[in-house]
Amino acid sequence: MDGTITVPQARPLIDHFGRHITYLRLSVTDRCDLRCVYCMKARPEFLPKSELLSLEELTQLSDAFIARGVTKIRVTGGEPLVRRDVMTLIENLGARLDTTALNEICLTTNATQLPRFAGDLVAAGIKRVNVSLDTLDEPTFSRLTRGGRLADTLAGIDAADAAGLKIKINTVALKDDNEHSLRELISWAHGRGFDLTLIEIMPLGEVDAARSDQFLSLEQVRADLERTWTLTPLTDNTGGPARYHRIEETGGRLGLITPLTENFCAGCNRVRLTCTGQLYMCLGRNGRLDLRAALREGGMAAVDALLDEAMALKPQAHDFDVSVGAATKVERTMAHTGG
Ligand code: SAM
Ligand code: SF4
């Protein structure tokens, strides 16, 4: 496949609230080699492979977004690097980097496969990866991921670092599980020269535990960190939900993503496409459009028309609730939607 854009129009994607959509999060699989306790059940039911978008469809749908002004695509999942042909997709997207509006491809990964792929990712034009890591304690890592090995993730981080990828660590703040070791994790990341972003758990899909038992407020974490550290707010705006701070004592950057305690939807610049071609305009809402059906039945013109519909339907904000007894309004997990 070459880098030709097959949709002729170049109308930007602007929603009803005036937000300019320039960022696509593209899930390539719902499968994963780990089973994080906050992300999925111990025995998840994965989609049949026949439901997934083909490599060619993933590329075509990406092209439809690029033609409408999307400049950044994040490849995610599930674990994106367990999809067999993912490197071909990333290479296809990489070929669009200098020839289209697309100016950045990034990846969110649990890092276990990075020793194998880090060099290829750099060769395809990827400069940055987000790596999920919630603890540096081996038994806790094994328990949280239900059998994962901390050494594999650390080896992946080392491989990415050696290949020259810029690394950001993503850490879900979890009551009891890592509540008392976040300072150690932040110090480690900053010592390695990595930014770290803390994320409040979101009630996405049913898992085997109650969300209210997992949820840890970042307001509380921040107050705890500020007992001994100085957090200076930074004005850096990545267009994302994270609010960044410099920790004066470590010299590193700390991002805080607080969907529950502080809403950030006003600046939303993104939409999410699942590995089955469902377009979600908001991570925290159920509204979706079927781009796979549009592509298969009406081709790229039908996809382009649905992107206009998507802009009309994008909601103003999510309405997450993790209080005791709250019903899970969003039935799909983060691994399904694409984290
Ligand atoms: N497997 C890759 C990884 O773990 O980085 C990519 C997909 S994963 C679904 C993307 C991100 O979503 C990870 O940082 C993970 O910690 C986060 N995540 C998963 N379930 C979540 C939840 N219920 N609330 C908040 N973050 C969640
Ligand atoms: Fe897999 Fe990422 Fe979900 Fe963990 S958070 S189970 S690594 S998809």
Image: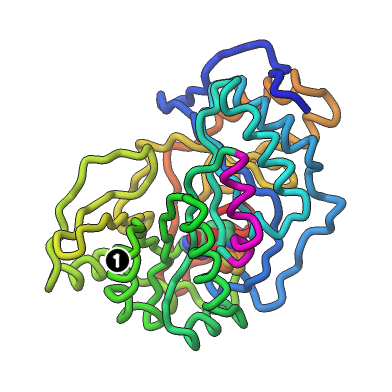
Give the residue displayed 57% in from the left and 28% down from the top.
97
Q: Quadrant of residue 261?
A: bottom left
Q: Nearer the viewer, residue 87 or 35?
A: 87
| Residue 320: % across, % down | 44, 56
Residue 138 falls left or right of residue 289:
left
Q: Amino acid at mark 1?
A: Gly
Q: Nearer the viewer, residue 302 or 10?
A: 10
Give the residue displayed 69% in from the left and 18% down from the top.
5
Give the residue displayed 87% in from the left and 51% down from the top.
50
Residue 334 falls left or right of residue 33:
left
Q: Is residue 121 magenta?
A: yes
Q: Quadrant of residue 247?
A: bottom left
Q: Residues within 10 Å of mark 1 (few under 14, many from 20)?
A: few
Q: Is residue 59 above or below residue 112?
A: above
Query: Seen from this angle, which residue lies furthest front?
Result: 162
| Residue 123: % across, % down | 61, 42
| Residue 149: % across, % down | 58, 79
Q: Quadrant of residue 174?
A: bottom left
| Residue 168: % across, % down | 41, 55
Q: Which residue is mark 1?
A: 191
Query: Seen from this angle, which residue lies furthest bottom?
Result: 139
Q: Is residue 164 above or below residue 21?
A: below
Task: Please provide the residue range marked out in magenta.
Answer: 112-124
